[in-house]
Image (cartoon, rainbow, N blue to C red):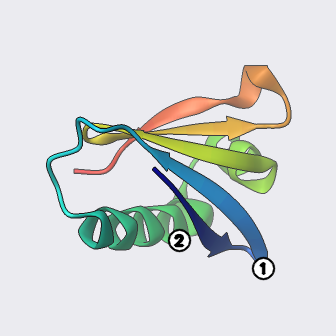
Amino acid sequence: MRMLITFQNKLVPVYFTTENKQPTQKVIRLLNSTLELKIQKGKSALQKCLNSLISIEIKGSEAILHSYSENDSLALSLY
């Protein structure tokens, strides 16, 4: 399943796997709050990834953040 969220004034696609057991709206709320917290207080490598974010993939309790540079992509725990 695919949804779009607004992050830093741009639309970012979020892809969900079918194995997710949590309700979609709860995961989106967790994702938004985690991203906002990390853009403000995260380490520089994480902020660099968030600034060039192109898509997010949710697998279980992790969000895989994909950026323009493959080297900047990383996994972020939501729980």
Residue topped by disc 2: 36
Up-down: is 39 above or below 54? below
Up-down: is 77 above or below 24? above
Where disc 1 sits, the SS reads loop
Q: Is residue 35 left or right of residue 29?
A: right
Q: Please, which residue is most extreme toward the bottom here?
A: 9
Where disc 2 sits, the SS reads helix
Residue 50, how many percent across, how many down? 69, 52
Q: Residue at x 67, y 36 (%)?
A: 66
Frontmost of labels 1 and 2 is 1
Q: Is residue 11 left or right of residue 21?
A: right
Q: Which mark is residue 9?
A: 1
Up-down: is 65 above or below 74? below
Quarter location, residue 40: bottom right
Q: Residues within 10 Å of mark 1 (few under 14, many from 20)?
A: few
Quarter location, residue 65: top right
Amino acid at pointer 2: Glu
Q: Residue at x 53, y 71 (%)?
A: 36
Amino acid at pointer 1: Asn
Residue 20, how many percent across, how many down? 23, 43
Q: Residue at x 71, y 43 (%)?
A: 49
Q: Residue at x 61, y 63 (%)?
A: 39
Residue 3, how many percent across, how many down? 54, 62
Q: Of marks 1 and 2, which one's residue comes earlier in the chain?
A: 1
Q: CA distance from mark 1 to mark 2?
A: 12 Å
